[in-house]
Amino acid sequence: MTRMPALYLSHGAPPLADDPVWPGELAAWSAGLPRPKAILMVSAHWEEAPLALGATETLPLVYDFWGFPEHYYQVTYAAPGAPELAASVRKLLHGPGMPVQDVPDRGLDHGAYVPLVEMYPGADIPVLQISLPTLDPRRLMDIGRRLAPLRDEGVLVVGSGFFTHNLAALRQGGIPSWSAEFDAWGHEALEAGDVDALLDFTHTSPAGRLAHPRTEHFAPLFVTLGAADATGDLADQRSVIDGFWMGLAKRSVQFG
């Protein structure tokens, strides 16, 4: 079986579906990938420790946002559950200091389903979402390394966040300097394979604390980096999507 790449994507918000460009970029990206046997999704919008495995059957979506027009709450994505993948994740993560719990009533949140609606609109690929048990980049890389063997079993490992994310600091129109500066720095660090700089991004990057005042939207990148590092794919990376959406960097990266 072909080894699946590992992805970090900027997932947008429910109005992504109405953007004239971004949905097509996501659709073109998935069309160029091997078809996954299953998708393992780590979203910025589910932080829970110990690491939790979400539903392994089809459940209603989690509409974890407020104040949007009603039609965004009518979106559905009835992807099959992935109980076999859940069993594999438990086995790979099992060990001292890495407890795993099940949250069987937890459906996909918008960090998972918003991009999947555009990438795999048929909702016919099993999806398992797992939580972020920590925001510590090094611990997340370790989780990604442990999960890397799934890629050889046809599983698409996806870290879903946003390359810059500070809604409180956005202003009407234009791209904030902190967003542009962090995006340029991050692109350069990824191309150089400078994992040390990325791990310490709050200190090594320009405007890092403005780009990510809370780091949950950058954190999924480190799961992806770990899944790529374990298979020697860190150097085989490219930014598939770049640019900005409402002032936030939508950079999305493929390894392998």
Image: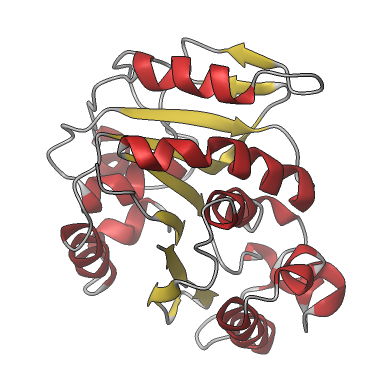
Tell me if 79 is positioned left or right of 249 in this view: left
Q: Nearer the viewer, residue 164 or 235?
A: 235
**Could you tell me which quadrant the C terminus lies in?**
bottom left
Q: Residue at x 19, y 61 (%)?
A: 27
Q: Residue at x 51, y 53 (%)?
A: 231
Residue 69, given in percent of the width and then of the height, sits at 33, 47
Q: Residue at x 34, y 57 (%)?
A: 15
Q: Nearer the viewer, residue 240 or 77?
A: 240
Q: Nearer the viewer, residue 246 or 129?
A: 129
Q: Is residue 146 above or below residue 191?
A: above
Is there any visible trace of residue 215 in the rendered image?
yes
Is there any visible trace of residue 65 in the rendered image?
no
Residue 42, given in percent of the width and then of the height, sits at 52, 40
Residue 198, given in percent of the width and then of the height, sits at 72, 69
Tell me if 5 is positioned left or right of 75 in this view: right
Q: Quadrant of residue 52?
A: top right
Q: Nearer the viewer, residue 68 or 161?
A: 161
Tell me if 78 is positioned left or right of 237 in this view: left
Residue 138, given in percent of the width and then of the height, sits at 78, 50
Q: Is residue 96 above or below residue 64?
A: above
Tell me if 81 is positioned left or right of 220 in this view: left
